[in-house]
Image: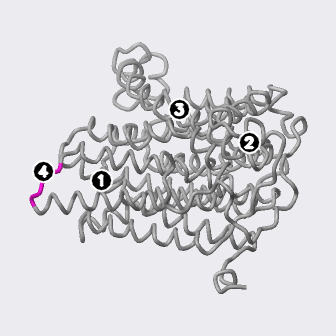
Amino acid sequence: MSLAQRLTITQPMRVFWITWFGQLISILGSGLTSFGVGAKVFLDTRSTTQFALLSFFALAPMVVLSPIAGTLIDRWDRRRAMLLADLGNGFTTLLIFSMLLASERGLFKLEPWHFYLPVALGACFGAFRWPAFFATVTLIVPKQHLGRANAMAEVASGASQILSPIIAGALIDSVGLKGVLTVDVCSFFIAVTTLLMVRFPRPTASAEGQQGKGSLLAEMKQGWAFISARKGLLSLMAFTGVAVLCMDLVVLLITPLVLAFTDISTLGRIASIAGVGALLGGIGMGVWGGPKNPLHGILGFHAFSGVVLFMAAPAPSVPLVATAAALYLFTMPPVMAGIQSIWQRKIPADLQGRAAAVKRMIILCVSPFAALIAGPLADDIFEPAMREGGALASTMGRLLGVGPGRGIAVIFIVLGLLTLTNVAAGWLNPRLRNLDKELPDALPDTPPATSDDTAAPNAPTAGASAS
């Protein structure tokens, strides 16, 4: 046995934790760059449009490429697909670093639109990261522990959202954007090192996964065909779409709700408290693992999140809104981890990449839709209706008061009712309620053994082109 083979880690749970740690560091680094570049663009231009376009180019390639990425992930060695994502993102960070350096040396004038290409390129590589990670989890984690594993992925995401802005803000003040980018590049080296240390098992071939083999287009269609033929999974996707829409609108609108009655520093404290709630929810789910039937936990926590929204609507109060925000984000990891574990258990391992990519593409479309409707709902409908003499001033105004932010408070009540309606509709839908009974698990009780021959026949070498 060679030295490399002796140093390679194959024990499933050790593989999971090492991989998870590497991806945690990687997304923390990505969060630093995202915050730093976004802050630079906004501060240089003071243009919300330029800032929003940056977000668009960070999201749109993921939506477009998800089906292709999922198909390639099922074809390739998933460890190498994750290496491709990390190396590609590291390259785009170096590209931004080079642009800054060239601009400082007077070679050209750096404009906001210059960031769009590297950001979009990074999003192209990022389209491979999470589908490959979640498809890999089913290969290395026993299915009874999938809820815990997915909760830890939520912890990683939550930690990035909390820590990245704090760390990036401190670094920008001390070493500037180039220092932030340097830390990000180092984070990718750590992620790549952890992936080089481990080996993933190959997925067991299934009849569903082998359908359409040989044609990239046919394999892409197979992911949707598998989901659409199973009404329970379609119902779960519809339920998830409504849940994500409510969550996105709450996250978007809580900022103007809070700033309507307090200052930005208080908003920051509320955001930090809310982030702690999300982190505790993820850790709690990671320790607990969720109920035997994940759907019960999903519906229960989602219903609780709807009730919590009513707390944020009464007369403006910083303690009340902070508590509601923390409780609301506390429910997100159990809901999302439970949903993810159902998808992983019900889809054959060799079809995970394609099915997960289709689901991700559809769910990713919800966020831009929420961003498009949030402003008109608040500015054009509910806020005017809750002013003195507005259409709702004599009814809802008696309960919530009138003035700035009160229209958004009404939206929160509507979203709370929509959340509870989503829970009721999910429970009353027999296909969703009986999903665990009607659709058998596609995964074995224990993960497959790791093979010494880790390279799949069609796997690209690390850093190879995704085309």
Q: CA distance from mark 1 to mark 4?
A: 16 Å
In the shown orientation, is residue 353 left or right of residue 318? Answer: right
Label 3 CA crowd tier, 10 Å (few <14, some 14–19, many 20+): some
Q: Is residue 268 above or below residue 60?
A: below
Mark 3 lies on residue: 366
Residue 289 position, x and y percent, is 76, 58
Mark 1 lies on residue: 37
Magenta segment:
106-110
Q: Is residue 318 above or below residue 370?
A: below
Mark 4 lies on residue: 109
Label 1 CA crowd tier, 10 Å (few <14, some 14–19, many 20+): many
Q: Earlier in the sequence, mark 1 or mark 3?
A: 1
**What kind of element bears circle 3?**
helix
Q: CA distance from mark 2 to mark 4?
A: 54 Å
Residue at 71%, 46% in the rendered image: 352
Contact (Cβ within 8 Å) of mark 1 with mark 3: no
Is 84 in front, or is 127?
84
Q: Is residue 461 above or below residue 311?
A: below
**What kind of element bears circle 1?**
helix
Q: Earlier in the sequence, mark 1 or mark 4?
A: 1
